[in-house]
Image: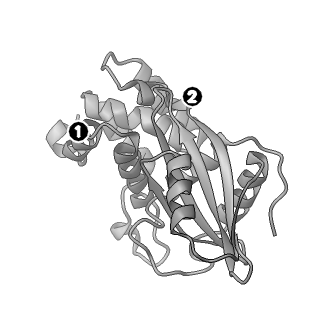
Amino acid sequence: MATPEEVPLIGEVRNALDGGHPLDFLGLLSMVVLGTTAQPLQNPEEQPPSIGELVAAFIDVQVPETTALLAGLGEMLVDDDALRAQCRQAARQRRDGLPLWLAELGQSTVHRAVRMTHVLGDGDELLLGVRFADGQEMTGVVSIDHRSVVTDAFLVPESIDAVLAVAKSNNTDPDVAFADIDRADARASLQEALDKPLSMFPLPDSDTWPGCRALVQWLARLMPSGGGAHS
């Protein structure tokens, strides 16, 4: 059985949870998911551990930090229902106290979606307002170009109202427009872009993309389905 010293991330998880805002931990968790993605051009022996292998290690090591990781992955592993259920069950069987926002991560909502467009622009930006079970908020900002490809994304630990207020006050271009959109339509636009493999349209990595991809995928699932994709 693995020991806490043999499991990476323990210290980073502790620091992220001590930070107080959910984004510290969720951003780290999203990077963990990306780090387990197989690289097509790497030799098999050089491939990173799979997410299943990491989950097995987290289940073996019963400390509060791995409980937090399992609780988070129990919501964020959007592409693997069985593994997500395994994470949830393992986290429920432990008695470690988790912050309310993490213990009730499944109750998080995307309560507002805004599209920022430019008349002559090459794409749009989606702003997604997120609210956690304890009332804390954050905002996701996703740039989607005319090919329906995510070109960049980042999250900020502020409410969407605060982010919009700053964006509008700093905007001096009359051709930039901000408009609330139906959350189902926002999900459809976002999902269409996320469904394209990262390797299909190679883009320079930013400080936050594709590191936050798993987090953005999770935000898409928090919105109602059934909208029509924006062209």
In the picture, measured across the screen, residue 16 lies left or right of residue 56, that is left
In the picture, measured across the screen, residue 43 lies left or right of residue 202, that is left
In the picture, measured across the screen, residue 105 lies left or right of residue 143, that is left
Q: What's the residue type where badge 2 is placed?
A: Gln
Q: Secondary structure at mark 2?
A: helix
Where's residue 169, x and y in %? 53, 63
Q: Quadrant of the N terminus?
A: top left
Which residue is tagged 2? 107
Where's residue 99, x and y in %? 36, 26
- Residue at image position (40%, 46%) is 23
Which residue is tagged 1? 14
Q: Is residue 78 visible?
A: no
Residue found at the far left of this picture: 5
Q: Quadrant of the C terminus?
A: bottom right
Q: Is residue 213 above or below residue 124?
A: above
Where's residue 55, x and y in %? 39, 40
